[in-house]
Amino acid sequence: MKFYNTLTNKVDEFHEIDKGKIGLYTCGPTVYDYAHIGNFRSYIVEDLVKRYFLYRGYNVNHVMNITDIDDKTIRKSNQMGVSLNEVTAIYIKAFLEDVETLNIVKADVYPRATEHINEMLTLIDKLMEKGFAYTKDNSVYFSIAKFPEYGKLANISRENLKTGVSVDSDEYEKDDVTDFVLWKGKKEEEPFWSSEKYGEGRPGWHIECSAMSSKYLGDHFDIHMGGVDNIFPHHENEIAQSQCATGEQFVNYWIHCQHLVVDNQKMSKSLGNFYTLRDILDKGFDPMEIRYLLISSHYRKMLNFSFDGLLQARQALKRINDFIFTLNGLNPAEGETVAITTLLNESEAHFQSDMDDDFNISGALGVFFDFIYQINLKLQELKKQDIKNILDFINRIDSVIGVLKQKEEKMLDAEIEEKIKQRQEARKEKNFKLADAIRDELKSKGILLIDTPDGVRWKYE
RNA sequence: GGCGGCGUAGCUAAGUGGUAAGGCAGCGGUCUGCAAAAUCGCUAUUCAUCGGUUCGAAUCCGGUCGCCGCCUCCA
């Protein structure tokens, strides 16, 4: 397996630290509002990557942080006039619901920043002891001048940092404008924690990820993921903090997901193209359609989100689901066909080689749709074992892409059973007018009737 | 100013030196009582553009145009 590593700026062959095991840290939500589809692109891409590792047989230990203390959560709490905890509880709950809706595999741990203040303070102590941090006006800062490798991830030199167009003017009390805060001294209207050495205050943003990743994954782990916007400064600062504190390499592979745009424009509230997951569900789209759209384009490319795209995703999913429906309706003889087994093996190998190559999902989906086409040509030749093998294959693919809903087996009620029976009678008597009327009636109730040589089949639409 | 990405059909999207995958949409057939599904045919002589290297370029090199991201708390 190989994939693009932001740290080295090239596609690297993957080697895990502990054979068969992967430590994965992904940047989670700041819980001050409902997550939007741009956020979810990142989470879904992370899910795809994780699911592929699982499919490849790795044991993945996945940690996703929840930022429940920062400027935005504090602002929201003041706006709403309720405590920080009450605000974040609302959005943590919403986030976890959305994760479930989108069929995202849950992380092993969702550590919250506010529950790891001690770990952060310990880390700050280490940085102070080793001389990488200094205190000033009740706050603690990291001195990037002490870390020569600073800027390696984002490929930014220190000179360029200083000429950058925006410098945070609020924090001019730092030694160097480019230093960043580890511990913020207490301010009016802000929640605070007491620390023995640095007084009352709250943690800076970056420190939580360094502290929590090391707690749950160790000082040195395999993969760290997030959106491209996090490369700088967030991930750069994490590296600085962690490596200076431990003296070890922090993360081996950094994977960053490109943003999405909506109708080719940056998503923003003022343009009216800002959507949360809930907004889109309210418009009648299915979560799997959203997931398919967000997954179907390469993670390092800008994705253009549009409602037309969702309709296209709907049709693509329909092709897969119709295929499964057809397979389930066949009446095959016992046995297995060599040609089918061969096709299955080739398709799966090809699917893997595409995914192995920097998660080339478009190529991999192409293989899958080609496979569906090939099997559709041979439906009549399929034997019982072939169908089982095909369905197993589809399940393995779906364990990676996660777009097929497990439909619960719903039974038809007696009244509808009776209608279907009536229609069959009518068809026998060539009374197609009545037959079609019954079919239309059931269709309006969401039940689709399909006539086959072996009798009538039905499904929910 | 610095760093980086992108430009392939109506939409979407692979392919990164050997002669343009796949999905959606469209048109016309087959199958079907009609549908549905499936299937067949048509739909990019061409990959933003100009030049170069090569037997051969969407792929490599150089220029140009256009779009976008980051440069201190935005996934």
Image (tube, coloured by chain):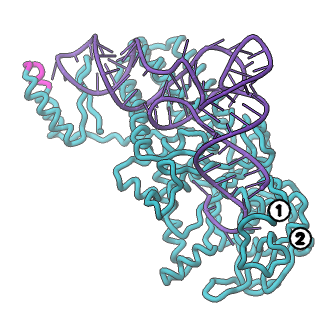
The C terminus of chain A is located in which quarter? top left
Which secondary structure type mostly characterizes the magenta part of the structure?
Answer: helix
Please tell me whether residue A379 belongs to the stretch shown in magenta. no
Up-down relation of residue A452 to residue A442 (above or below): above
Horizontal side of residue A214 vs A397, given as left or right:
right
Whole-percent x, y for residue A410 in the image: 30, 41
Whole-percent x, y for residue A105 in the image: 56, 49
Foreground: A303 or A168?
Answer: A168
| Mark 1, secondary structure of its residue | helix
Label of residue A261 in the image: none
Please report the bounds of the magenta region as a residue range: A424-430
Tell me if label 1 and label 2 are in contact, CB under 8 Å. yes
| Chain letter corresponding to the colour purple | B
Residue A300 found in image quarter? top right
Q: Residue at x 56, y 56 (%)?
A: A39
Q: Residue at x 79, y 57 (%)?
A: A218
Residue A446 found in image quarter? top left
Mark 1 or 2 closer to N-term?
2
Chain A colour is cyan
Q: Residue at x 48, y 80 (%)?
A: A80
Q: Residues within 10 Å of mark 2 (few under 14, many from 20)?
A: many
Whole-percent x, y for residue A181 in the image: 77, 74
Q: Residues within 10 Å of mark 1 (few under 14, many from 20)?
A: many
The N terminus of chain A is located in which quarter? top right
Foreground: A355 or A153?
Answer: A153
Say whether residue A122 is visible.
Answer: yes
Residue ID for mark 1: A240
Q: What amino acid type is highlighted by mark number 2?
A: Phe
Residue ID for mark 2: A132
